[in-house]
Image (tube, grey):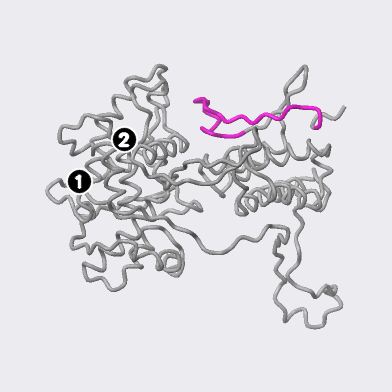
Amino acid sequence: MNIFLNAHLTLFFNKTDHQELKQGQPAFFLEGEKRQQLFEEPTHFLNSYYVYGSTAESPHTWAKAAYSLKSWFQYLQAINRDWPDASEEDRCEYRDAYLTGISPKTGRPYSGSGVRDSMTVVRLFYKHCSGNGLYYGDIGGVVPASTDHRPMDQDALVHTRLLPQTKSRDRALPKVRPGTKIHPIRVQDLTALLQYIGPQAGDRRGDERPSRDRLICDLGWVVGLRLDEINNLTTLQFLNLNADTSTPLVNMPLTIHNGKGKKTRQVAIPTWLVVDALAYIAGERAQSLKAKKTKSRNFSTRLLLAHASSKSAGSPITNGAIQKMFRQSCFATGLINTVDKKDLTANIDIRAKVPKHSIHDLRHTYAVLTYHAERAGGNSEPWKKIQAQLGHENLQTTIDTYLKYVEIFNEKPGLIDVRKMIGL
C-alpha cells in the first residue's frame, strides 16, 4: 500500500521551548489509519534549506515555503501521483490549476506572483531530493548557459575559454508584470490610525491603553522596517543604546540583523522612539513576563511579547498576530475598500470589505514622508538616505519603486521631526 497516496498530510510548526528545535520550525507528517510517521523528505529539505540554511531566518518564510509544499502534495494526492513519480508536466498542470482557480481564503483568483513562489519552492525541493539520490525525474533540472558541448580534449582553445556557467532557468514559471505597487498611507489616515492603536510608551499623556502596538507601527513608518525586522528585534538592541531625552530628534544607530536576504545593516532611529522602546521594556513587557504561566530557564530576549492579559503572556508574538491587529485597526478607523469576491460554498459573486492597507504599507509611508522631509530640509538627493534605511542594494530600486508616488502628499513639511510634520 502506498503510504503517501493513502495518508492524510499534516503540517506541524514547533511552538515548544525544546532546546534542539527553533520556534516555528516546520515538519510534515503522514497520518494513516493506525499510525503517524514523519514525512522525512520535505521536512529535511525545509530544515536544511530554510531553517538551518543561509536562505532565511524568518519563521514566516519557513511557513510560506511549507504551505507551498503542502498544496503541491495535496495536488499530487488528488491526481493519484506519488511524489517521487511527479514530472515537470505535473508541475505545469499544477500551475495552470492555480492560475485558473479561486482562493477559498480570499474568494479571489490566486495571484501570479503567489503561484510563481510556490512553483519555485517545489522546484527547489526536487532539486534537493535529486542531489540526495531520492528523485530521478525532470523537475529541478538545470539548463546550461553555454551551447558549446564539445569535450574538452577536442577543443583546441579550451585553455583560452572561461568555464561555462550553469544556470537554473525555470521557464515554466508564470509571468508576472514587473514593478511594485506601493500604498503609502495618507497623512490624515495615518494620524487617525495611530491615535486609535494606542499611546507612546514614553509619552502616554494620561492614556493607559497598551502601547506595544503603537511601538510596532512607529517602527514601521518612522524607521521603515519590514514586519520580520520589527518582530525579530531584541531587548538588547535597545538596552545597549544610551538615549538622551534632552535631544529627542537626534538619530541613533540601530543594527538590524534579520533583514531580507539575511543581511545586516544599520538604520537611524530617533531618540524619542528609543525612549518609547525602553519604556515598553520596563513596563508592559516586564508585566507580560511576570504573568507568564509556565516559567522557563530559557527566557526570550525578543522585544515584542504577548500582552499580560493574554493566554500567551510572556511569549513572543507572531507575525500573524501583528497583521491581524493592523487589519482590525484599519476596519475600526474606516480604512476599507470594497472588492468583488467569489463565495465558493454558495457559488455566487459577492462584494466584501477588506482593509485598505497592510502593515507593510507603513514602510512605504516612511519612504514617501522621508522624501518630503529631506527635500524640505535642503537635501537634493533624498533617495540615498531612503535607500540606506530601507536596505535596498541598488539605488535604482529605491527610485523606481517610489518616484512616481512622492506626490501623494500635498502638505509641505517644514521640520525633520515627522511627527510634527503630520500633526501628532
Is there CB contact under 8 Å for labels 2 and 1?
A: no
> 245 left or right of 296?
left
Residue at the spot x=76%, y=52% of the render? 92
| The disc label shown at residue 243, or none | 1
Locate residue 284, reporting x and y percent: 28, 29
> 417 left or right of 405?
left
Q: Which stretch appears magenta?
A: 5-26
Q: Main secondary structure of the magenta part?
A: loop
| The disc label shown at residue 415, or none | none
Residue at the spot x=72%, y=34% of the render? 40
| The disc label shown at residue 212, or none | 2
Residue at the spot x=75%, y=45% of the render? 129
> 164 left or right of 236?
right
Locate residue 182, reporting x and y percent: 44, 57
Which of 147/133 is in front? Answer: 147
> 254 left or right of 317?
left
Which of 224/332 is in front? Answer: 332
Name the quarter where the N terminus is drawn: top right
Q: Amino acid at mark 1?
A: Ala
**Callout count:** 2
User: Which image quadrant is residue 45 in?
Assistant: top right
Q: Residues within 10 Å of mark 1 (few under 14, many from 20)?
A: many
Which of 11/424 is in front? Answer: 424
User: Which image quadrant is residue 200 in?
Assistant: top left
Q: Tag 1 or tag 2, which sits nearer the N-term?
A: 2
For mark 2, give the secondary structure. Answer: helix
Q: Amino acid at mark 2?
A: Arg
